[in-house]
Image (spheres, grey):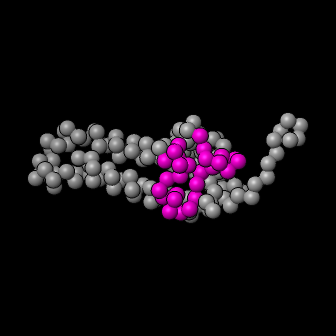
Amino acid sequence: MTDGIRVTTHNFHYAPWYLRMASIGIDLAIVWLVVLLLIPGSFRFSSLIAGGHYNELISFFGSFDGIWFWLLPVIYMLIFWAVLSRTPGMMLMKIKIANYEGGNISILQALLRVFAWIMAAIPLLIGFIPVFFSKKRQGLHDRLVKTIVIRKR
């Protein structure tokens, strides 16, 4: 403790950008496969199941499946980040989201991180550029919510 400021030194192995991007790709593939297979009307796939009665199905499910196509990834990330501090894609890449002490993130941090992640992505993915250059490999969303992505040992 120095002048009321807690000083800690950790020797984290920060996750490189390519592991983070690979985990996102895996997670999106999982989520969109679920949307494709489980939500009627998605990607016009239901017209095959319904014997070509696509128009009747799309009038009922049309806006519903479009919402799920974008909402399901958000729900997926929120649940996995809040409970495990990592998604299945992150598990495969052996990385996790951590607080600055290296512990699991809180439910509030997970919730805020989802919204910060979306805001970082909206303007042409500009919020992710710092991941390539910062010492701790933090994107804008990580800095705002005080998280790091580290290799799980």
The quarter holding residue 10 reads: bottom right
Q: Does the rendering let one see residue 122?
A: no
Q: Quadrant of the N terminus?
A: top right
Q: Residue at x 22, y 53 (%)?
A: 45
**Is the residue 109 above or below the residue 133 in the image?**
above
Any magenta on residue 33?
no
Q: Viewer-proximal residue, 33 or 95?
A: 95
Q: Is residue 6 left or right of residue 112?
A: right
Q: Is residue 13 left or right of residue 37?
A: right
Q: Is residue 12 left or right of residue 45?
A: right
Q: Viewer-proximal residue, 103 or 109?
A: 103
**Is the residue 11 above or below the residue 82 in the image?**
below
Q: Residue at x 14, y 41 (%)?
A: 56
**Is the residue 120 above or below the residue 13 in the image?**
above
Any magenta on residue 101?
yes
Q: Residue at x 36, y 53 (%)?
A: 32
Q: Residue at x 34, y 40 (%)?
A: 67
Number of numbered discs on residues:
0
Magenta residues span 80-106
Query: Measured from the top left, where is residue 147 in percent x and y?
Result: 64, 46
Query: Measured from the top left, where is residue 99 in percent x and y?
Result: 65, 46
Query: Measured from the top left, where is residue 96 in percent x and y?
Result: 58, 54
